[in-house]
Image (cartoon, helix red, strand yellow):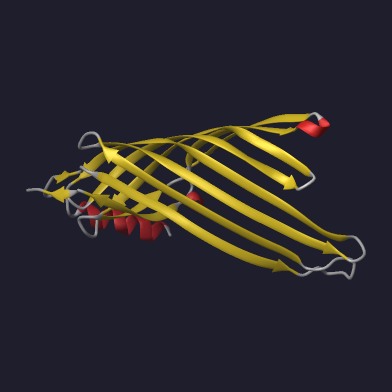
Amino acid sequence: MKKTVLALVLWAAAFTGRSQNLSGALLSGSLKYSTQTIKPGNSFSDDTELSSFSISPSIGFFISNSIALGGALSYSNGDTRQSIPGYGSTVLNSEMLAIGPFLRYYKLLGTRAAFFGQATGAYVTGSQGSEDNEVSVSGAAFGVAPGFVFFPTTKIGLELVLGGFTYQSLEYEQTDFGFSQTENNLDFNLGLNNLTLGITFYLGRAAKE
């Protein structure tokens, strides 16, 4: 992985003979659905079925040749179903929604590449638990991460983003039992194990001599 990332950066550096124009909009997103069945190693419980769905669109607009401002939304829903003979089945659900702004600053490398720094913020809300014991979740998340983008065409950017710095503060509340708890998580990771690869559409971008 390290050799692949280094080769991509060096290849892009060879195309720094011309300047480039970043304008218009950038559009990206992800869509994921997965299912899994876990078979127990005993006869006291049946299979555990896991299913999850998530969608994360984002759109931004360039307010200058090197700065983009936009918004992102992320929605996820997951179920865990387990059956125990003689006791029925239990379904645990997790549903989360996050929405907020992002800001990107680009350091241009000719017409084919750029480094960028990205700052994000989000309001988070959702719920976890079973139908008769549901816990509400609310809070905020913030992050700063470095990235690199290579343009194989004028409108398409292949992006590498490192984990960077993230902070999350979430409150868990169950009103029926008077339960309330706040969790604060701080993470800083620039390792390649947190590397994210993606494709972003740059609508309105045009190279210039």
How many marks do you count on the picture? 0
Please state if 1 lies on the left or on the right of 98 as rendered.
left
Please identify the quarter of the rendering in which residue 132 is found.
top right
The residue located at (68%, 56%) in the rendering is 79
Please state if 135 lies on the left or on the right of 32 as rendered.
right
The residue located at (44%, 46%) in the rendering is 162
Q: Nearer the viewer, residue 46 or 22?
A: 46
Position of residue 18 relative to residue 38, above or below, is above
Q: Position of residue 99 (x, y in %)?
A: 48, 38
Q: Position of residue 47 (x, y in %)?
A: 78, 68
Position of residue 93 relative to residue 178, above or below, is below
The residue located at (45%, 51%) in the rendering is 195
Please identify the quarter of the rendering in which residue 102 is found.
top left
The residue located at (46%, 50%) in the rendering is 56
Q: Position of residue 149 (x, y in %)?
A: 30, 50
Please identify the quarter of the rendering in which residue 168 is found.
top right
Please state if 83 lies on the left or on the right of 200 as rendered.
right
Q: Position of residue 1 (x, y in %)?
A: 43, 60
Position of residue 99 relative to residue 1, above or below, is above
